[in-house]
Structures are given as C-alpha cells and as structure tokens.
C-alpha cells in the first residue's frame, strides 16, 4: 500500500510538473508576452487601481499597511506611483516604440516574462518580506534589467538619438537605490529628494515624447486633417526651460528664482501647446485627452510659481503635475498604443474610454481646484480624487484587458 501510494504520488507530481511546464511554455509563447506594452500596460493599470485604493483606504481610515513597516506612508505612495506605475508605463512604451525606431525585436517571451516578474516582486515585497535589505534588493531588480533590454536594440541599430533613454533608466535606478539606502539606514535624508527628482524625470520624458508624437496624433486624428504649427525657437527652449525650473525647485530653492523659471516654462509650453491645437480635437477623445494632460503641465508650472509665496498650494501644484500630466497623459497614451498596436481602428475606440478620460479630468479638478474654492474640504478632496482615479483605472482595465491579451485583429 505504501509503495503504491508513493508511486501514485510520484505519478501525480510528474503530471503536475509536466502540466506546469507546458503551461509556462504556453504563456511565454502567447501573444501577451510578444511585446512590452501588453503585460506592462495591463499590470500597470491594474496595480495603479489597487495601490490607489489601498492609499485611499489608509488615508480615510488611518489604517496602517504592512508596507509602512518599511516605507513611510507618503514615501510608499510616491514610490509606487513613480517607480511602480510610472516606470511600468515607461517600460511598456519604450519596449514598443524602440522596436519601431530600430526595426529590431525588443525583449519578448521568456525574457519579457522575467522582466515583468521582477516588476511584480517589487510591488509585493514590502507586504510579504520582513528583512529591509531584502525588500530593497528585490525592488531594485527591475530597473537595471529594463536598462539592459532597452539598450540592446538601440546599440545594435546604432540609434544614438535615443541612447539617452538608457541613461534615464539608469538614473532612475540610482535614485531608487538612494531611496532604499535611506530606508535601510546606510545614508540619511536621501529618500525624499530621490523620489522628487525621479518624478520630475518622468515628467521630462513625457515632455520629450509629447513633442515627438502629439503633433502627429493631433493633425492625423481629427476628421479634417490640419497642419500643426511648430515654433523652432520654442522647441529649442522647451527642455532647457524645464530643467532650469527643476534645478531651481529641487536644488537651489530660491523662491524668486523658482517662480520666475516656473512662469517662463509655463509660457514656453503654452505656446508649444497652442501650435498643436485645433478645435476639432474635442471631437476625438484619444486626441483631446493628450492636450488636456499637457495643459495641466502648464497649470502645474503656474501653481508652483504661486506656491513659492503661498506654501499651501505646493501639494495642489504637485498633483496638477501628477494626476493631471502623468496620470492623464499616460492613460491616454496607453489607450492609443493598445488600440493602434493591436491592429484596431483608432476611429472606433472602446466606448468606456471617454468616461475614463472624463473621470481622470474630474479627479484633477477635485484634487487641485476644489481646495482653492473650499479649503475646509481639503482632506475629503484627497479621498474623492483618489476614488475617481481608482474607478477610472478599473474601467480602463475592463475596456482594454481583452485588447491586451488578444492577438492583433489584422493577423
């Protein structure tokens, strides 16, 4: 009987192992891991909804989360929105765009699956691990690996124009390292400067990519094609004005200088956006969402300038950048890339996308503008705005999940 049991148990284990092996192969070969945007966009949006829901619950109920044993509450919220959600979107976008730029296949199959697993482990590590050094190590796996996978096709193709993308990811990895070194006690007072710098680097990447694709998306995406206007001098000043603003805001700290550089950046970016604008954009959600997201960048500059003399506006300005620019632009780009790169017609996007975009705009209005009118409800605006974010991203997952896991409709 014992031998029979052992043999049966052995056969059972063998069957399970074989099934698991074949299932793993099937997953690796499936369309889901064929290109970066599919897993990273789906997981980024799903994780964003879950993490924001946790944050809203914590804030409303003052309920401690296990991750706060390692991160402070604010640091966890910032870290996950920047290094979790933000960099997952960046990964999905770059691994897709670089294939178009170089005509070389970016990481897929097993390699992409392992990269995704590294990102997932970073999100769950503070909830399941107790050793601080191990939480830090697990979370730091993703960005260096991403830098390697981004660099390989760029170097093979000699695409020097986009080498800075690799440098950006490496810099983000170093900033993440500084944050963790602070958390484990190796250095002091580096976590906050690290995540603030990382946040504005992601905004810088959005500004760069907006200049490359927003004009084309705008003029080609409306019923009657129009010609956008690009001002050569403005284009030359866009990034220098932004970096001078960040240098003043984060490292110099002189209020008058920060206010001046913020207003200068606002004017330059407003002129840039005006050149892309045409009233037809309001007929096409996939176009107006990008313009509105960029508009909140300008709002962020103006409010940052005012906050130098009205400190109570600092977090309102910050969330004009974060919810308004990072949130709205990324969800708009993910929608567009998901539809276009699966062979679907951009003229007929999922019906849920318009409500998703409108919920995101409402989330910014509640978080940024309502406290200006009714300061007494400030704390509730955090809860309401966060809840709107959660609903928007949950609906996005519902509308786009099938697109992201299904083969291209054009074969």
Image (spheres, rainbow, N blue to C red):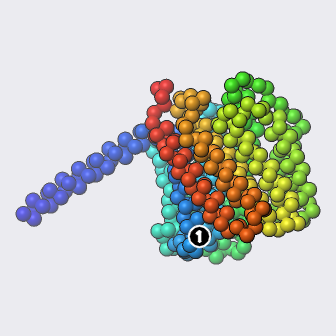
Q: Residues within 10 Å of mark 1 (few under 14, many from 20)?
A: few
Front residue of 269 and 389: 389
Instruction: Pinpoint residue 216: horizontal percent, then vertical percent.
Output: 72, 30
Residue at the image point whose x is 60% and y is 55% from the top:
388
For this view, does 197 lie left or right of residue 95? right
Front residue of 379 and 131: 379
Front residue of 215 and 371: 371
Instruction: Pinpoint residue 9: horizontal percent, then vertical percent.
Output: 18, 58
Q: Secondary structure at mark 1?
A: helix
Using the rendered image of the protein, determine whether residue 82 is visible from the camera's viewpoint. Answer: yes
Q: Residue furthest top?
A: 224
Instruction: Pinpoint residue 162: horizontal percent, then vertical percent.
Output: 71, 40
Residue labelled with disc 1: 60
For this view, does 221 lie left or right of residue 259? left
Residue at the image point whose x is 78% and y is 62% from the top:
372
Front residue of 282 and 78: 282
Residue at the image point whose x is 62% and y is 61% from the top:
384
Using the rendered image of the protein, determine whether residue 181 is visible from the camera's viewpoint. Answer: no
* Residue 375, picture quadrant: bottom right
For this view, does 219 lie left or right of residue 400? right
* Residue 2, picture quadrant: bottom left
Q: Is residue 204 above or below residue 187?
A: above
Q: Is residue 287 above or below residue 203?
A: above
The quarter of the image holding the N terminus is: bottom left
Residue at the image point whose x is 62% and y is 64% from the top:
383
Q: Is residue 94 above or below residue 124?
A: above
* Residue 101, picture quadrant: top right
Q: How many marks?
A: 1
Instruction: Pinpoint residue 400: horizontal percent, then vertical percent.
Output: 51, 41
For this view, does 392 lie left or right of residue 295? left
């Amino acid at each position: 009987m014992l031998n029979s049991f052992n043999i049966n148990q052995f056969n059972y284990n063998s069957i399970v192992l074989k099934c698991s092996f074949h299932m793993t192969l099937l997953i690796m070969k499936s369309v889901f891991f064929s290109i970066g945007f599919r897993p990273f966009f789906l997981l980024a949006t799903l994780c964003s909804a879950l993490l924001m829901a946790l944050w809203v619950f914590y804030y409303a109920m003052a309920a401690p989360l296990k991750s706060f044993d390692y991160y402070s509450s604010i640091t966890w919220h910032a870290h996950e929105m920047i290094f979790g959600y933000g960099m997952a979107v960046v990964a999905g976008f770059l691994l897709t765009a670089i294939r178009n730029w170089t005509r070389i296949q970016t990481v897929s199959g097993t390699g992409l699956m392992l990269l995704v697993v590294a990102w997932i482990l970073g999100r769950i590590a503070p909830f399941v691990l107790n050793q601080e050094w191990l939480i830090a190590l697990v979370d730091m796996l993703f960005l260096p690996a991403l830098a390697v996978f981004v660099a390989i096709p760029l170097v093979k193709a000699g695409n020097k124009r986009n080498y800075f993308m690799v440098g950006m990811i490496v810099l983000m990895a170093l900033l993440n390292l500084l944050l963790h070194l602070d958390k484990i006690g190796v250095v002091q007072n580096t976590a906050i400067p690290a995540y603030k710098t990382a946040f504005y680097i992601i905004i810088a990447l959005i500004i760069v990519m907006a200049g490359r694709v927003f004009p084309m998306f705008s003029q080609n995406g409306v019923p009657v094609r129009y010609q956008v206007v690009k001002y050569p001098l403005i284009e030359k000043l866009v990034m220098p004005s932004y970096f001078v603003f960040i240098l003043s805001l984060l490292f110099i700290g002189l209020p008058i200088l920060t206010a001046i550089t913020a207003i200068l950046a606002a004017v330059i970016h407003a002129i840039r956006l005006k050149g892309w604008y045409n009233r037809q954009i309001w007929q096409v959600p996939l176009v107006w969402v990008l313009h509105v997201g960029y508009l909140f960048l300008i709002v962020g500059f103006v409010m940052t300038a005012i906050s130098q003399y009205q400190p109570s506006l600092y977090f309102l300005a910050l969330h004009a950048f974060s919810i308004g620019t990072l949130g709205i632009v990324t969800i708009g780009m993910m929608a567009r890339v998901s539809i276009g790169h699966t062979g679907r017609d951009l003229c007929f996007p999922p019906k849920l996308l318009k409500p998703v975009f409108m919920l995101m705009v409402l989330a910014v209005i509640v978080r940024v503008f309502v406290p200006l009118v009714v300061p007494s409800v400030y704390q509730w605006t955090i809860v309401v705005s966060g809840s709107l974010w959660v609903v928007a991203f949950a609906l996005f997952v519902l509308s786009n999940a099938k697109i992201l896991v299904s083969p291209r409709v054009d074969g």
